Amino acid sequence: MENLTAFLAALVFLVFAGHRLVIARGGGADPAQRDVAGFALSAGMAMLLNAPAVLGAVDRFVPSPDAELLLTSELKAAAGTFLALVALALEPPRSRPVRIRRRRRVGAAVVVQAVALGLFLAADVTDDGERAVAAPGRGWVLATYNVLFAAYLCWCLYTLARALIRHACRTPPGPLRIGLRLAALATATAVVWTLWTLDDAAANLTDGGQGLGEDLLSTTLGMVTAVLVASGATATFWGEHIAAPLRRLHALRAHSDLEPLWSALHAQLPEIALDPDAARRRPGLRRAEFARYRRVIEIRDGILALRPYQRAEPLDWAVRALDRTGLAADDREAVLEAALIAAALENKRAGRLYGGTPDQAGLTPSARLETVDDEAAWLVRVARAFTHSGVVRDIRDRVRAQITAD
């Protein structure tokens, strides 16, 4: 099982690295794409070399398995360095140029790699067939080697996670923001993956050795990290393919939610239907957004046509009733507009034409309606109040009673 998860993780990393290298080819390519490719290539090679089956095959050509341990650790550190460089591309501009900050991070990586190499050589690591073993009394040196790599990788991951979260907060909702959040989740998984290697440090201090290769939990964490990284980096591609059906489903639901209000308006004002043949048909998923757009226009046309039938008195009744309920401001706005529509419809049904338009101060929603989505969402709230609000029902009954009395 360890071989399968290690190979899968390595495959995802290496395929993703190839994809990024194709994107990054050319002189004008974004350097961050090359850093992402470098990370994926380093991590993929480390996972591949750490697979138990590969370790067994390499033993035929490499006389000392401890060299494989050193190489995989160096590859993981290189992957962390590439992530720290990616973080620079996401951070806001600063007074110090990015070029200088890149050099400093690369310099820090070189120092870590050099110190780690010195510690590894000082530990005088050998192998007993299945485990790497430090020289007698030098287990603490090998433990320091493992802790150094874990600490460096955690710092690189923290740097990237901080940049990803800040960038996601500045990014509007959409596939890119989803990708940034998935990448941040991948860094959290990678931190757990890195900290799990500290069990090697504990073994170093206990008996001076550690197992070669990765265990099942480690390779599983690596595979999860690889999938999250690839998903986050390609979210702008697959996110749009998922977002389009979701938008249509949302539009279809809004179209259905607007049905009660539209039907009430259409019963008194059939001329608002832009397409009488399609007015009563349930739209398919592919035409849901257009059908919702048409329904929003028709409802707004109906509300405008009802203005000569509006009076200020029902609006005053609704305001006083809402003052007693303590309803939230945004819900209050929807109920007031629904009450005014309900009263005007009763007057239209009775043929009571007033010719004026009452003062509608306070009816304009506090939220800005800048898009069709905003307008549809607002009218859905009005439609729900029109259908379910007790205040609207009371206003409708009072207007009917007034009409009967007159």
Image (cartoon, rainbow, N blue to C red):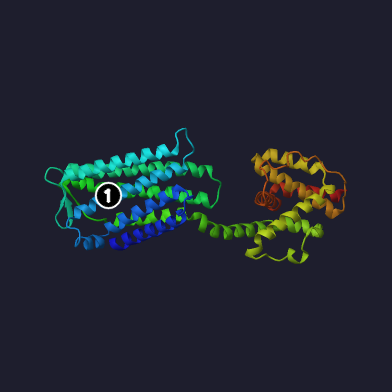
Say above or below: 367 vs 215.
above
* Quadrant assignment for the N terminus: bottom left
Q: Is residue 205 visible?
A: no
Q: Residue furthest left?
A: 136
Left or right, 222 with reference to 265: left
Residue 349 versus residue 395: which sits nearer the camera? 349
Residue placed at 44% from the left, 39% from the top?
Answer: 98
Tag count: 1
Q: Residue furthest front?
A: 27
Name which residue lies at 19% across and 42% down. 141
Task: Tell me the quarter of the picture where residue 157 sits.
Answer: top left
Q: Residue furthest top?
A: 95
x and y, in percent, of residue 258 in the image:
69, 56
Residue occupied by mark 1: 73
Vertical position of residue 329 compared to residue 286: above or below: above
Q: Residues within 10 Å of mark 1 (few under 14, many from 20)?
A: many
Residue at 79% over, 49% down: 343
Residue 385: image x %, image y %? 69, 50
Horizontal and vertical percent position of residue 40: 38, 53
122 relative to 378 in the view: left or right: left
Look at the numbered disc 1 and give the secondary structure of its residue: helix
What type is the residue that disc 1 sits on? Ser
- Residue at 71%, 51% in the rendered image: 386
Q: Nearer the viewer, residue 191 or 336?
A: 191
Q: Tell me residue 188's x, y (percent).
A: 39, 47
